[in-house]
Image: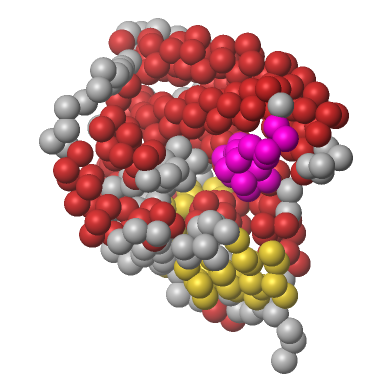
Amino acid sequence: MATVETLDVTKIEPRLKHPTIFKYFDALKAGEEFIIENDHDPKPLYYELIGERGNIFTWEYLEKGPELFVVKIKKNPAANTQTEVQRLNVTALEPRMKHPTIFQYFDALTPGQSFIIENDHDPKPLYYELIGERGNIFTWEYLEKGPELFVVQIAKNPEDGVGEETIGSIAAKDIRKAELLKSKGIDFCCGGNKTVKEASAEAGISEAELRAELQHAEKAVASPSFNYDQWELDFLADYIVNTHHRYIKDNAENLNDMAIKVAEHHSDNHPELNRLSTVTYHFLQDLVDHTIREEEFLFPVIKQMVAKARNPELETSYEIGSLAQPIAILKKEHDVAGEDLSFFRKLTNDYTLPADACNSYQYLFEKMKEFESDLQTHIHLENNILFPKALQHEAELAKAK
C-alpha cells in the first residue's frame, strides 16, 4: 500500500499555502489521499475545494485542535462519482414549473448530495434565487457552458451545523458579541464562516461556555458604536473607502519603512526580523492592490445596484449576475491577509518585545498591532455585512428582471 503524504502547512509561506495544497490535490488519482497539518482549522480550504473542484473528495478530521489540526483529504474513487446523481432536463418542463421543480429537487437533497440540471440557456438567475431563498448552502459547478447546452451540478454543502448561525453573522448583528469574540481571540472576519462549536474548539473553551457568554453579552450596555448592519450598502462602501482603505494607504509606506529599518539594526540578534520585513512588504503591496480593485470595480457596481433598487428604471453598466465571482476572489484575498496576520504573530511571539528592543522596535510592534486591529474590522465589514448583502441585493434584482 502506498505511503500517504503529509503536508505541514505551517511551514509554507502564507500566500502559497492554498495553491500548494491545490497542487497536491490535483496530483491525486481517484481514490488517493494526502494529509495536511495546520495550527488552526483549515475549514476555509474545504469551501475553496468544494467551490473550485466540486464535491469530488472526502474531508476527514484526524485531529481537531485546539493546537493541531490534521485532515485527510481523499479524492473520490472514479467508480463512485456521479453514479447516483439525478439529472433534470429543464427544457422539457413547462416554463412556469421550471424553478419550482428545481427547488423541489434541491430541497429533497441531503447534505453532500447533488443533482444535475440541463438547460438551453445559462440558468444563472436560478443561482441567485437559490442564494436568496435557501442561503449559501450549496455549490454551483458548470459541467458544460453553452452556447447551446448548459449543464450545472448543484450540490448541497456536506458541512457540520448546516443552517447554524456563524460567528461572522453573530458579530455583524451585535457589537457587544463582536467585542466578546474579539476578547476571546476568536477571528470573526476571515474566520467568520465558523459555527460557535468550531470557534469554541479553536479558542480552547467549551461550546456551552461560549454560548453562555454570548447570551450574557446581550444584557451588557453597548459601548458607543456604529450599527453597520443597518446602513445602506452604498453608504457602507463609502465608509470603508474613507476609513479603512484610507488607513491602509496612509500607513502602508511608513510601516514598510519601519520594518526595514528595525531589521537592518536588529537582525543580527533577531534574524526573524528579515523574514518579517520581506513578508510585510508583500502583504502591504497586496492590500493596496486589493483596495484599488474594490474601489475601481466592486464598489461602483454595488452603488449602481443600490441605485437601481431605488429606481428600477435606471440603466446599469454592469450585468446583473456578475458579482459572485469577484466577491469570491476578494474573500480569498482576505483569507490570505488573515493568514499573513497570523504568521506575523507567530514570527514575533505575539509581538513580544526582546530586552534589547529600541524605541523604533517598540513603535513597529505597536503599529503592527494597530494595523491588525483595523484590518480585522475592515474585513469583518466586507465579509460579514457588505458582501452577503450585496449578493442578496443582486439576487432580488435578478428575480425582478
Residue 117 seen in render: no
Quadrant location, the C terminus:
top left
Residue at (13, 36) in percent of width and height: 219
Seen from the viewer's position, the closer of residues 21 and 224 is 224
Q: Is residue 264 left or right of residue 319?
A: right
The part of the image, by quadrant, that contains residue 234 is top left
Compared across the picture, whether 352 is left or right of 65 comes to right
* Nearest to the observer: residue 291 or residue 326: 291
Q: Residue at x 51, y 58 (%)?
A: 41
Where 38 sits versus 170, above or below? below
In the image, is residue 158 above or below residue 351?
below
Q: Is residue 347 left or right of residue 245?
A: right
Quarter assignment of residue 230 = top left
Q: Nearer the viewer, residue 8 or 145?
A: 8
Tell me residue 309's x, y (percent). 33, 15
Q: In this view of the protein, can residue 295 be seen by the observer?
A: yes
Image point (70%, 16%), residue name: 254
Task: Report the residue that reaches farthest toward the left.
Answer: 219
Camera-nearest residue between 210 and 393: 210
- Residue at figure coordinates x 23%, y 45% from the top left: 214
Residue 40 position within the rendered picture, expressed as x and y whole percent measured from the top left:
53, 56
Task: Tell me where the magenta segment starts and ends, as one range.
Answer: 337-357
Above-or-below relation of 99 to 242: below
Q: How is the image coloured?
A: secondary structure
Magenta-colored stretch includes residue 159: no
